Amino acid sequence: MNIKLKKFQKAWALSVPALALVALAMVAFAAACGGSEPEDLIFNVNIEHDAWDVANDIIKVKQGDHVTVNVESDVQGGFHLHGYDLYNEVAPGAPMSFEFVADATGNFEIQFHKFTLVSDELATDDPAMDDMVEDDHVEGDEHEAEDHEDVDETELSLGSLQVFPR
């Protein structure tokens, strides 16, 4: 038998199992990365002493997941999920819950707008927001004035929502 042919047969015999192993690894990787069905996920968040109890300050989900966030807080404020433009108020002893489908992928900041009472006017830490508040309180708009308590708002960055492609 030809020496070149023997070397080729030997190399081929060694490469077939290696190729099979690579193919198996690719199938396992593809199964782990995608193709799964959307899940119903529930996150219970407790905001206490200006922090929340979420591991590594990140809520991780996949695109298409139905997400429910249950929020409790030791102070009155607003839970704000940027990018999804979700804002819900929560108060001590009055937990709140909201739901959404994680349709946009990426990293989205989560803030808590902590409310505290101030003197006779609505104030925030943001001058642009103060201007918006002043614009809301026009003469003759008593309904608007009755809806607001006199509060000061402090923004706390809690962490983020990470939505990965499915």
Image (cartoon, rainbow, N blue to C red):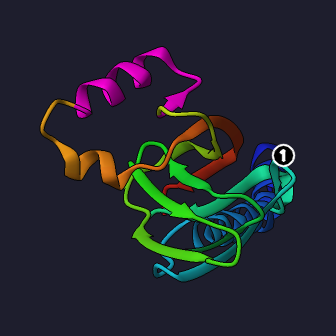
Frontmost residue, 144 versus 85: 144
Q: In which quarter of the image is residue 45?
A: bottom right
* Residue appearing at x 30%, y 45% in the figure: 145
Residue 2, horizontal then vertical, whole percent: 78, 49
Q: Is residue 93 above or below residue 82?
A: below
Seen in the picture, residue 139 relative to 98 is either above or below; the reply is above
* Front-lying residue, 42 or 19: 42
Q: Residue 123 or 28: which is nearer the viewer?
A: 123
Report whether 158 appears left or right of 130: right
Q: Is residue 130 magenta?
A: yes
Horizontal relation, residue 9 to residue 160: left or right: right
In the rendered image, residue 98, in percent from the top left (x then y), is placed at 47, 73
The residue located at (18%, 30%) in the rendering is 138
What kind of element bears circle 1?
A: helix
Q: What type of secondary structure mainly makes up the magenta span?
A: helix
What residue range appears in magenta? 122-137
Tell me residue 42's x, y (percent).
62, 80
Q: Can residue 76 be seen in this view?
A: yes
Residue 83 pos. (x, y %): 42, 43
Left or right: residue 42 versus residue 11 is left
Image-based side of 118 in relation to 35, left or right: right
Question: Which quadrant of the figure contains the N terminus?
Answer: bottom right
Three-letter code, disc 1:
Ile
Residue that label 1 marks:
3
Count neighbours of disc 1 (C-alpha within 10 A) and say few if under 14, some if 14 to 19, many if 20 or more: few
